[in-house]
Amino acid sequence: MMPEVPVMLDTNCPDTFCSGIAKIDRLSGNLLRLVIYSEHPTANGKEWVVVAKLIMSASMVPSAMRQIAFAIGERGAEFSDTVTRLM
């Protein structure tokens, strides 16, 4: 089991469903902004709505990728190995 970062649960922080990452912007220094979107059906097809913008240190990306791979389980094992090799 991968250890979790001990954080205080913030009950004012709602869960937000997302479909993917629309883009990643490099900000000043080592910061990245991930623009997260959700796909919604409309009468004319689909629309993509930005639901969050997350700012994180680029140095945290490998750790985040390993945590995602671990959460996926066996399907993420190969991905996790690739992430480790890239670091």
Image: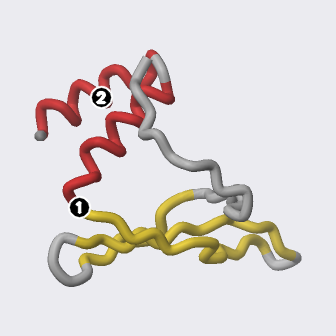
Q: Decide: few, some or many residues near mark 1? Use Cα within 10 Å; few <14, some 14-19, many ≥20.
A: some
Residue 41 versus residue 71: which sits nearer the camera? Answer: 71
Residue at image point 29% right, 42% down: 63
Q: Quadrant of residue 59?
A: bottom left
Residue 53 in picture, x, y percent from top left: 50, 74
Q: Quadrant of residue 77?
A: top left
According to the picture, the residue beneath numbered tag 2 turns out to be 80
Quarter of the figure that contains the C terminus:
top left
Quarter of the figure that contains the N terminus:
top left
Q: Judge from the rendering whether residue 66 lies leftward or rightward of residue 49; answer left or right.
A: left
Residue 26 in picture, x, y percent from top left: 25, 77
| Kind of residue indicated by mark 1 | Ala
Q: Decide: few, some or many residues near mark 2? Use Cα within 10 Å; few <14, some 14-19, many ≥20.
A: many
Q: Secondary structure at mark 1?
A: helix
Badge 2 or badge 1: first in the primary sequence: 1
Residue 34 versus residue 55: which sits nearer the camera? Answer: 55
| Kind of residue indicated by mark 2 | Ser
Residue 32 in picture, x, y percent from top left: 30, 71
Residue 28 versus residue 34: which sits nearer the camera? Answer: 28
Residue at image point 70% right, 75% down: 47
How many circles with numbers are drawn on the protein?
Answer: 2
Which one is in front in this view, the residue at disc 2 or the one at disc 1?
1
Give the vertical position of 61 relative to 85 (above or below). below
Q: Judge from the rendering whether residue 31 lies leftward or rightward of residue 19; answer left or right.
A: left
Q: Quadrant of residue 44?
A: bottom right
Residue at image point 65% right, 56% down: 10
Q: Which mark is residue 58?
A: 1
Q: Which mark is residue 39?
A: none
Residue at image point 63% right, 49% down: 9
Residue 85 in picture, x, y percent from top left: 12, 31
Give the vertical position of 86 relative to 1 (above or below). below
